[in-house]
Image (cartoon, rainbow, N blue to C red):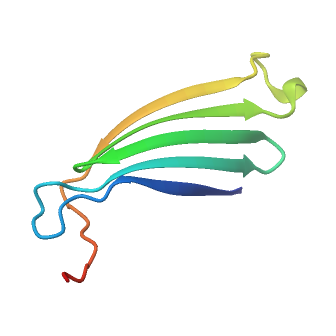
Amino acid sequence: MIIGTSFDILLDEGSRRTTFEQETMLSIGLNYRLNDALITSVMMKWNGFQVGLSYDAMMNINRIPTKTAGALELFLKYSFYKEQRKRFIR
């Protein structure tokens, strides 16, 4: 079981009237895998792309067969479906 949270920081709001300029967000997260690891992550979202980096820091070094402290993970994701927020144009 993993418990955690992430915070999105809006860097660029994007266009209010068209979909040409999408929002740009930075997401920072912290999670805890019960009795196993602390997971930190940072992710950037823009124009359907998401690029992220996370690190799993093992809490109990004696349970790990390789005796390493954790694992670094890098990912790239593209969404064909563009999520649109409904906005009121003033």
Residue 39, x across and y down, in percent: 67, 41
Residue 72, x across and y down, in percent: 58, 25
Residue farthest toward the front in the current orientation of the protein: 90
> Can you say whether 25 is above or below 60 in the image?
below
Left or right: 79 in relation to 4: left
Of residues 14 and 83, the one nearer the viewer is 14
Count of number-bearing discs: 0
Q: Which residue is painted at 57% across and 40% down in the image?
A: 41
Of residues 28 and 79, the one nearer the viewer is 28
Of residues 87 and 51, the one nearer the viewer is 87
> Can you say whether 85 is above or below 66 in the image?
below
Quadrant hosting residue 50: top left
Left or right: 15 in relation to 35: left
Of residues 29 and 25, the one nearer the viewer is 25
Left or right: 53 in relation to 89: right
Residue 90, x across and y down, in percent: 20, 83
> Can you say whether 42 is above or below 48 in the image?
above
Q: Which residue is painted at 18% across and 68% down in the image?
A: 16
